[in-house]
Image: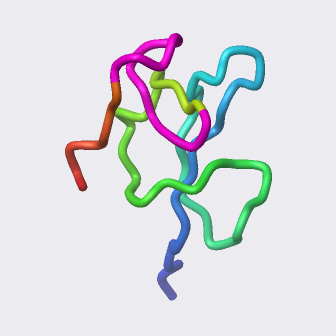
């Protein structure tokens, strides 16, 4: 029997808002940030005020190329 994965998440370092991990889960998680697609390009991007950025200052917006 195959396992079906439904949720994609980014793990954010609370000290600097940097994404330090991405994962897929069959369980909803409230301790991680939901992302629309599994994309390892989220790693080392910054999640600030509900938006993704390439830089820690939040001046260069970023979006996954898989969207």
- Given residues 41 and 2, the one toward you in this image is 41
The image shows residue 52 at horizontal and vertical percentages of: 45, 35
The image shows residue 9 at horizontal and vertical percentages of: 57, 52
Q: Is residue 41 above or below residue 17?
A: below
The figure's colour scheme reads rainbow
Query: In the rendered picture of this protein, how many numbered marks are placed on residues?
Result: 0
Quadrant location of residue 47? top right
Residue visible at 46% across and 28% down in the picture: 43
Give left or right: position of 49 versus 58. right
Where does the C terminus fall, quadrant-wise?
bottom left
Residue visible at 51% across and 72% down in the picture: 5
Residue visible at 38% across and 57% down in the picture: 37
Give left or right: position of 40 versus 8. left
Q: Indicate whether residue 12 is drawn in magenta.
A: no
Q: Indicate whether residue 55 is drawn in magenta.
A: yes
Q: Residue furthest left?
A: 65
Give left or right: position of 43 versus 17. left
Q: Is residue 3 above or below residue 66?
A: below
The image shows residue 28 at horizontal and vertical percentages of: 70, 69
Quadrant location of residue 7? bottom right
Quadrant location of residue 63? top left
The image shows residue 41 at horizontal and vertical percentages of: 35, 33
Q: Is residue 28 above or below residue 63?
A: below
Q: Main secondary structure of the magenta part?
A: loop
Q: Which residues are magenta?
A: 49-60
Residue visible at 76% across and 16% down in the picture: 15
Q: Is residue 51 above or below residue 7?
A: above
């Amino acid at each position: 029997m195959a396992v079906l994965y439904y949720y994609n998440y980014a793990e954010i370092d609370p000290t600097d808002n940097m994404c330090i991990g991405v994962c897929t889960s069959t369980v909803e998680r409230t301790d991680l940030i939901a992302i629309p697609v599994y994309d390892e390009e989220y790693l080392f991007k910054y999640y600030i005020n509900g938006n993704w950025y390439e830089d820690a200052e939040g001046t260069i917006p970023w979006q996954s190329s898989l969207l």
